[in-house]
Amino acid sequence: MTPRYPATADSILALFASRGAQVVDVPVIQPADPFLDMAGEDLRRRIFLTESETGESLCLRPEFTIPVCMQHIAANAHLPRRYAYLGEVFRQRRAGGSEFFQAGIEDLGDPAITEADARSLADATALIALLLPGYEITTTLGDQAVFEAVLAALGLPRGWQMRLARAFGMPDQLKAALGDLSNGKTPSPLDGELAGLVDARDEAGLAAHIERHMDRTGLSPNAGRTPQEIAHRLIEKAELASVHLSVQAMGALQDFLAIHVPLGEATAALESFATRAAIAIGPALEDFAARVAAIAGHGVDPATVSYDAAFGRPLDYYTGLVFEIAARGNRQTLAGGGRYDRLLTLLGARTPIAGVGFSVWLDRIEAARGTTP
């Protein structure tokens, strides 16, 4: 079947060529597990799932980043590499419709991280400007790495750092997690011998207790987690529930999340915050400052970009820069992207591969054209 393309396809492909990005095609039918494991809760709910004749879980392509990365790994292509794409994605939406065109660039293997970040934002800005000439666009920028550096500097246990990092970009989940952290210890739903073993942090005894219960009820460890895994998880949850963040540390975290300034003021705002909180976030802050300088060097007007410390994107694979672009006066996101340095390793790459990219929603571009620039 010949794919359909939007009327702007030729202009988009010409832009990709001018920016040194190789256009690739990836199959519409994809293995479902990578998306279910790595793509984020919101996207997982919207995937169209099916099954192969052999029982393999499949889905219609819901986005391009994961398939492009898997195709790169399979080809064992040289690096660095810039892949561009233009095609349909398939998602369930409450507002109706299930097929939407996306275009974007995935930039893999460039060791100059801050330069690649700035180039990705410049690529996305150039594509929006091409498709919406005369429209004023605004960009919101966040940084997963800075957020995680703040969590570590505040001395949170690793488990809490992971929970809050996963909630970054999902305001309701982040608010709930911070509420749990503020309240400290919560009542345990366990009772009797099980609760005693958890309270004593007796992992071996707890695993033995769970194994005896599984034997009595006929449950097989092969059907899910092993008794040892269940015991470890129960103790980990109890340890997290017992953590209480001090008023001072919680105030510092809320102070950080309240930072929302023009990009040109962002480095100074973060430095001022770190001084007030008496914490060191040096490497993350140095990378942030270098990226701000690189963004201006790639021709993006800093006046159109704001930094929001609480801003993230609801996909699990981001590790650093995250951004979204909109037309002023239009709240709908036209483009979004970010850095995902762990993703290719999780997808099977033998060595770590740096990655950053973005996608533009072409149907939203068409809708934005109906508004006054």
Image: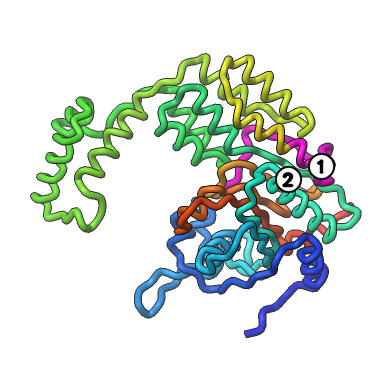
User: As drawn, is 305 to the left or to the right of 286?
Assistant: right
The structure residue drawn at horizontal position 21% and vertical position 57%, both measured from the top left corner, is 222
The structure residue drawn at horizontal position 78% and vertical position 71%, both measured from the top left corner, is 9
How many other residues sit within 10 Å of disc 1, few (<14), some (14-19) or many (≥20)? some
| Residue 85 drawn above or below residue 230 | below
User: As drawn, is 62 to the left or to the right of 236?
Assistant: right
Q: Which residues are magenta?
A: 292-314
The structure residue drawn at horizontal position 71% and vertical position 38%, both measured from the top left corner, is 291
Query: In what element is the residue under mark 2?
Result: helix
How far apart are the alpha carbons under marks 2 and 1? 8 Å
| Residue 241 drawn above or below residue 172 | above
**Callout 2 amino acid:** Ala
User: As drawn, is 138 to the left or to the right of 23?
Assistant: right
Residue most extreme to the bottom: 1
Looking at the image, is mark 2 or mark 1 earlier in the sequence?
A: 2
Image coordinates of residue 52 in percent, x first then y, are 40, 76
**Callout 1 amino acid:** Gly
**Residue 237, picture quadrant:** top left
**Residue 132, picture quadrant:** bottom right
Query: In what element is the residue under mark 1?
Result: helix
**Tally of numbered discs:** 2
Q: Which residue is mark 2?
A: 118
| Residue 342 drawn above or below residue 78 | above
Image coordinates of residue 265 in percent, x first then y, are 77, 28
Magenta stretch contains residue 245? no
Q: Which residue is mark 1?
A: 297
Of 119 and 232, the residue lying toward us? 119
Magenta stretch contains residue 310? yes
